[in-house]
Image (tube, grey):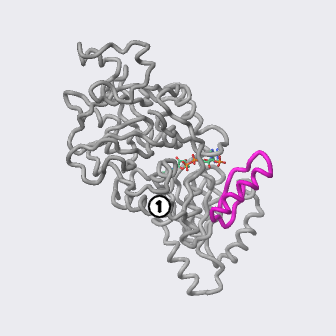
Amino acid sequence: MPALGPQAPLRLGGSTGLLRSVLSRPQRLGALTRPLTAPLMARRHKSGPYGYTQAKTLVFSKFGEPSDVLHLHTHSISPQLPEGAVLLRTLAAPVNPSDVNTIQGIYGVKPQFSPLLGTPEPSVIPGNEGVFEVVAVSAGVSTLRRGDWAIPATTGFGTLRTHAVAEHADRTLIPVTSHEGLTPAQVATVSINPCSAYRMLRDYTDLIAASVASFSKDPSTPGGAWFLQNGANSGVGRAAIQLGRLWGLRSINVIRARATEAETEALKASLTSLGATVVLTEAEFLDRAFSSTLKSLTRDGRDPVLLGLNCVGGKSASAIVRALSPKGTMVTYGGMSRQPFMFPTGPQIFKRLRFEGFWLSEWARENPGEKRKTIEEIVALMQDGKFEAAPVEEVKWDWETKETVLKEAVQGTLEGFRSGKGLFVFGET
Ligand SMILES: NC(=O)c1ccc[n+]([C@@H]2O[C@H](COP(=O)([O-])OP(=O)(O)OC[C@H]3O[C@@H](n4cnc5c(N)ncnc54)[C@H](OP(=O)(O)O)[C@@H]3O)[C@@H](O)[C@H]2O)c1
């Protein structure tokens, strides 16, 4: 389970409670406060009475489709932070497919519904990724200062909210020490997809060593070791292309065709400009002619395809099994088509293939230091202009933004073809 879930800020408050439902605030503050009448509620108070921060969060109290089960909840956060905690303001937070699967109740981990937010039913705050600005720091925090940017160290933080309190901030947050030249959108999307791409390219097969070995054996080798991936236009796919190029690897990338030839060609060109060596549509990849294309790309197997990354499943995944070279490894990390796949028997046996599953959350739980280093490395690449964030469709989240707008943005994550991942960008909150 995540180290810091939606319950955490509430635990901090102990008997006084850090987060309080706005609706019950008049009772708690007694005669000192006015009831929150409609005209007063309509006005925005970034700071409530006595330094309380007014905050809003998406929550869900049962599993289902985001448009059915998400609600926008308003609460306030006490200015008295416990030792080791920081108060955060959200700058940007993407909606990833896993966020929607978590709300649907079909993800690998089911979050615990908590009564502590003061919602009518026990609830959970969705969202695993985002970037925050530190707005207040309590005693005992050594790695963060006011004004710094920070990203959650683990998934399950609950990022689809305007503000958060992070306890044990030195451990639960990764500071972005210098964010000069970076946008919130870039930093908000670094910790899950680029980090996953990085680990999958490095931790299963040593492609860099394989490249060096082929060059030393045959200096006429036309490029580095090959990897193959479907879902190549996803956040993970685009990150893998770029990291692969930086590490001298060659990549075969499979995408879904667009409605017109021209749109498909434009998408292919966009991935090629990122560093993809070859880009194919699913239809081209599944076509019989692909085996001769593969033969010529790999110089009849002399430059083997040692790693396949699969986030689609179905026929596309089976085709990766067929395309891998002997002793190749296939890593499955997603199932966007929602189709199971057949493992062709012959290739498994005669090519002695290896099949692995990758799950970032578990990897990060087991390797917290490595996760920090991976993120720091990718952030540095972004600052050097060597790594581009995946395209996003920005959805502005201001204090006045309606619940329906936020819910629709989350619901849209798994629907149809999109020009980019949905990303909440927080303005006047
Ligand atoms: N296991 C892990 O730790 C881990 C970590 C990160 C991500 N993931 C998984 O990786 C996958 C991609 O995530 P992301 O955030 O990078 O994605 P994303 O940027 O939100 O993009 C979604 C991708 O899925 C493709 N897609 C959607 N429906 C599809 C279908 N029916 N058939 C084939 N492709 C389809 C889209 O293709 P188009 O480009 O054609 O629209 C798009 O490229 C998801 O399954 C996610 O859960 C897993």
Evaluate whether residue 351 shows in this view.
Answer: no
Q: Which residue lies under the disc numbered 1?
A: 378
Q: Let me know if residue 258 is in the magenta part.
A: yes
Nearest the viewer among 108 and 198 is 198
Residue at screen point 39% across, 52% down: 362
Q: Which quarter of the image is occupied by the C terminus?
A: top left
Hey, what amino acid is under mark 1? Ile
Q: Let me know if residue 181 is in the magenta part.
A: no
Question: Residue 123: x and y, percent?
Answer: 38, 28
Q: Secondary structure at mark 1?
A: helix
Residue at screen point 45% across, 42% down: 91
Q: Is residue 182 left or right of residue 364?
A: right
Evaluate whether residue 38 shows in this view.
Answer: yes
Q: Is residue 420 above or below residue 243?
A: above
Location of residue 62 (image quadrant): top left
Residue at screen point 46% across, 25% down: 71
Queried on whether the Cβ of the residue with tag 1 lies below 8 angstroms from ligand 1, the answer reads no
What is the crowding at mark 1: few (fewer than 14 residues within 10 Å), some, or many (at least 20)? many
The range drawn in magenta is: 253-281
Q: Is residue 37 above or below residue 422?
A: above
